[in-house]
Image (spheres, rainbow, N blue to C red):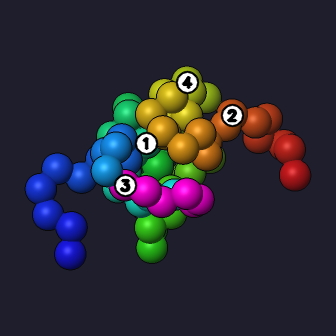
Amino acid sequence: AVTGVQTCALPILEIDYGCLGFGSCVEACKFGALRVENGVAIVDETKCAGCGKCAKACPKGLIELVPADKK
């Protein structure tokens, strides 16, 4: 189990791929549009304002803004 400060920006983590699941993006979202489920960030498109703060908070660069109608 992970104890102490939990943030995606910890330099000691050497995970090369995928979401770290600590929720730095969730904390950055002032609209409540993100949650971490089973270690993966999930976006609620109905709450997302497209501000981009979640994308900036992700040290892995896994979040990007795209048009809502993009498949």
Whole-angstrom CA distance, mark 1 to mark 2, is: 13 Å
Which mark identifies residue 51? Answer: 4
* 21 or 52, nearer to the observer: 21
| Residue 64 sits in quarter | top right
Separation (CA) of disc 3 from disc 4: 27 Å
Instruction: Report the magenta stretch's main SS.
Output: loop
From the viewer's perspective, is the residue at label 3 or at label 2 nearer? 3
Number of numbered callouts drawn: 4
Mark 1 or 3, nearer chain start: 3
Question: Circles 1 and 4: CB distance less than 8 Å?
Answer: no
Q: What element does badge 4 sit on?
A: loop
Q: Name the residue under label 1.
A: 25
Which segment did they paint magenta?
13-18
Residues at circles 3 and 4 in contact by the CB criterion of under 8 Å:
no
Q: Answer left or right for 69 relative to 10.
A: right
Disc nearer the start of the sequence (1/2): 1
Local packing at callout 1 (Cα closer than 10 Å; few below 14, some 14-19, many 20+) is: many
Q: Residue 65 carries which label?
A: 2
In terms of depth relative to the viewer, which is nearer, 5 or 65?
Answer: 5
Up-down relation of residue 54 to residue 20 (above or below): above
Amino acid bearing label 3: Leu
CB contact under 8 Å: marks 4 and 2: no
If you read the primary sequence from the N terminus, does the residue marked by circle 3 or circle 4 appear first? 3
Q: Residue at x 31, y 45 (%)?
A: 10
Please say whether residue 14 is one of the residues in the magenta stretch: yes
Cα–Cα gap, marks 1 and 4: 12 Å
Where is 53 relative to 25, above or below?
above
Q: In the picture, residue 36 is in which quadrant?
A: bottom left
Please tell me which residue is depicted at 44% across the width and 67% down the height of the picture: 39
Q: Name the residue under label 3.
A: 13
Q: Can residue 15 be seen in this view?
A: yes
Neighbours of disc 4 within 10 Å: few (<14), some (14-19), many (20+) = few
